[in-house]
Image (cartoon, grey):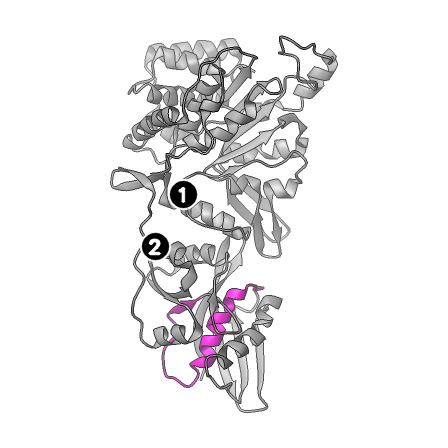
């Protein structure tokens, strides 16, 4: 008699559902796993035998064959241990396991251990097989309890898992977050009002702080241009803590992408911040594909958050040009001979650069040592198509101003603008609106439209630059608590377009 149990394996940034079959035949005792099982699954034989022995199960004196179907897809992962062990432990019991999923690595003492890859697989199971029964490691309860559309059960060891399969009970209840939240139209958006890095540390730079506020409120791409030590990196690193609240779905996406890179994962109301070094390889920035498994790069790991490039012109030109697609489409496609995967990459791009190779072009106290040709060559590393995808350009100068502002005050303005965007019915924030949403939410009256047309002709703005100016104006109006885009809002937006 063939018994079946369900599991899943990674396929790109998604998953393939795997049907695990078992059969017990008379013959010399043996244990075989078939179906393109990788080394981590083949090694499961020793872990399963050890766990069964420590759970007082006698190993069946049969020829045991475990098949992972479909057999033409390569499979890897220690999370196959638990379903394989369950099929062997329950081989004599007449129970239908075909509607159960099981994930977990087994210890030799029969304990069930967690694995980072389980979380993204669960999200795919919830989409493809809603309301399924799923058995998971108990030490991941706080993380997995919030996966929607599944009947989730937790077990600490193999014996407990077997008892749950025989008599399903104590289904997990959804874990309640301790985060602060806003509730708009019956949806919760989570945030943290503790600021590890505070804008109060930065003296002066009023214009740069204003630009950072606008950028954060609407998720608009921004470049800071200024001399070394003027505060570019300090501002960029503090922007993470004033970003808009995050939805549960966005949190799930962030956790999923981190798990795919085998990172420590947990829910957080703070949006991600990634700061790769200029020497990073192209694969580490864009992501890579190994066999059927996709490894997200820095662009995807900063999805729904900030990707910060310090010393922007020093990044390899091919990397900078590769940013054009994700900055425009909010996704990045990577193709190989027989595979094509698309990574999500809705990011707020923040760049910081010096005005020249020596950095002293704007300095009031130091003399620039660069030739005109060197300055031109340095700034030409940023192509026109790349710069056209940036919403705000900020020229930072040396300042003796002592004016300061707390991150708490800036975040209060961001929350106000966020509420206005969501109460208008926007799914995406202003900087990420598509063309249809732009026409719906960013309406210009005739006088403002005429002013914009004059600016387009005068400054030679492309169609993309024109659209970005409108989106930027909408965010400035939201910060001003204005229902309509006014002349002052458009003029301020235009002032940030010069580079």
Local SS, label 1: helix
Give residue 148's mark.
2
Residue 57 at x, y percent in the picture: 46, 84
**Residue 7 shown left or right of residue 283 in the figure:** left
Residue 405 at x, y percent in the picture: 41, 20
Q: Residue at x 63, y 24 (%)?
A: 382
Q: Quadrant of the N terminus?
A: bottom left
Q: To which quarter of the image does residue 322 belong? A: top right
Contact check, label 2 and label 1, Cβ < 8 Å: no
Asked if residue 73 is positioned above or below residue 492 in the image, the reply reads below
| Residue 407: in magenta span | no
Toward the left, the furthest residue is: 186
Q: Nearer the viewer, residue 381 or 106?
A: 106
- Mark 1 closeness class: few <14, some 14–19, many ≥20 residues within 10 Å: some
* Residue 198 visible at all: yes
Give residue 182's mark.
none
Q: Residue at x 58, y 56 (%)?
A: 292
Disc 2/disc 1 C-alpha distance (Å): 14 Å
Q: Quadrant of the C terminus?
A: top right
Asked if residue 229 is positioned above or below residue 447 in the image, the reply reads below
| Residue 78: in magenta span | yes
Residue 477 at x, y percent in the picture: 34, 19
Local SS, label 2: loop
Q: Residue at x 55, y 39 (%)?
A: 299
Q: Nearer the viewer, residue 202 or 141?
A: 202
Residue 226 at x, y percent in the picture: 59, 17
* Residue 443 visible at all: no
Q: Which residues are magenta?
A: 73-102
Q: Dot 1 corresponds to which residue?
A: 250
């Amino acid at each position: 008699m063939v018994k079946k149990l369900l599991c899943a394996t990674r396929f790109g940034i998604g998953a393939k559902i795997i049907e695990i079959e078992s059969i017990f035949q008379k013959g010399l005792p043996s244990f075989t796993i078939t179906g393109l099982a990788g080394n981590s699954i083949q090694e499961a034989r020793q872990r399963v035998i050890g766990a069964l022995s420590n759970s007082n199960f006698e190993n069946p004196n049969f020829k045991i064959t475990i098949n992972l179907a479909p057999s033409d897809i390569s499979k890897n992962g220690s999370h196959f241990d638990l379903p394989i062990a369950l099929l062997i432990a329950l081989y004599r019991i007449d129970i239908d396991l075909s509607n159960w999923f099981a994930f977990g690595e087994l210890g030799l003492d029969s304990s069930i251990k967690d694995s980072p890859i389980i979380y993204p697989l669960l999200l795919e199971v919830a989409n493809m097989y809603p309301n399924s029964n799923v058995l998971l490691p108990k030490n991941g309860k706080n993380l997995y309890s919030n996966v929607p559309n599944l009947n989730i059960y937790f077990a600490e060891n193999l014996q407990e898992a077997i008892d749950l399969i025989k008599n399903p009970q104590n289904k997990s209840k959804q874990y309640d977050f301790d985060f602060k939240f806003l509730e708009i139209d019956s949806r919760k958006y989570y945030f943290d009002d503790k600021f590890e890095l505070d804008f109060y540390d930065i003296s002066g730079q009023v214009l740069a702080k204003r630009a950072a506020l606008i950028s954060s409120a609407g998720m608009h791409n921004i470049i800071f241009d200024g001399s070394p030590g003027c505060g570019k990196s300090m501002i960029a690193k503090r922007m993470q803590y004033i970003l808009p609240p995050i939805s549960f779905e966005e949190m799930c996406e962030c956790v999923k992408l981190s798990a795919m890179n085998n990172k420590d994962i947990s829910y957080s109301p703070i949006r991600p911040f990634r700061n790769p070094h200029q020497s990073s390889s192209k694969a580490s920035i864009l992501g890579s594909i190994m066999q059927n498994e996709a490894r997200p790069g820095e662009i995807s790991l900063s999805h729904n958050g900030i990707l910060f490039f310090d010393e922007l012109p020093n990044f390899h030109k091919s990397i900078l040009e590769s940013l054009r697609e994700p900055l425009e489409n909010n996704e990045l496609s990577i193709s190989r001979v027989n595979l094509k995967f698309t990574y999500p990459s809705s990011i707020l791009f923040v760049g910081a650069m010096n005005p020249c190779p020596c950095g002293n072009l704007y300095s009031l106290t130091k003399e620039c040592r660069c030739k005109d040709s060197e300055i031109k060559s340095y700034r030409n590393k940023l192509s026109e198509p790349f710069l056209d995808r940036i919403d705000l350009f900020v020229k930072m100068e040396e300042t003796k101003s002592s004016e300061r502002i707390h991150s708490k005050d800036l975040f209060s303005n961001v929350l106000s603008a966020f509420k206005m965007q969501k109460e208008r019915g926007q799914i995406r924030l202003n900087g990420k609106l598509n063309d249809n949403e732009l026409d719906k939410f960013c309406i210009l009256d005739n006088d403002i439209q005429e002013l914009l047309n004059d600016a387009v002709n005068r400054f030679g703005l492309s169609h993309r630059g024109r659209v970005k100016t409108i989106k930027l104006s909408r965010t400035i109006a939201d910060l001003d608590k204005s229902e309509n885009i006014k002349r002052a809002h458009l003029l301020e937006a235009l002032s940030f377009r010069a580079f």
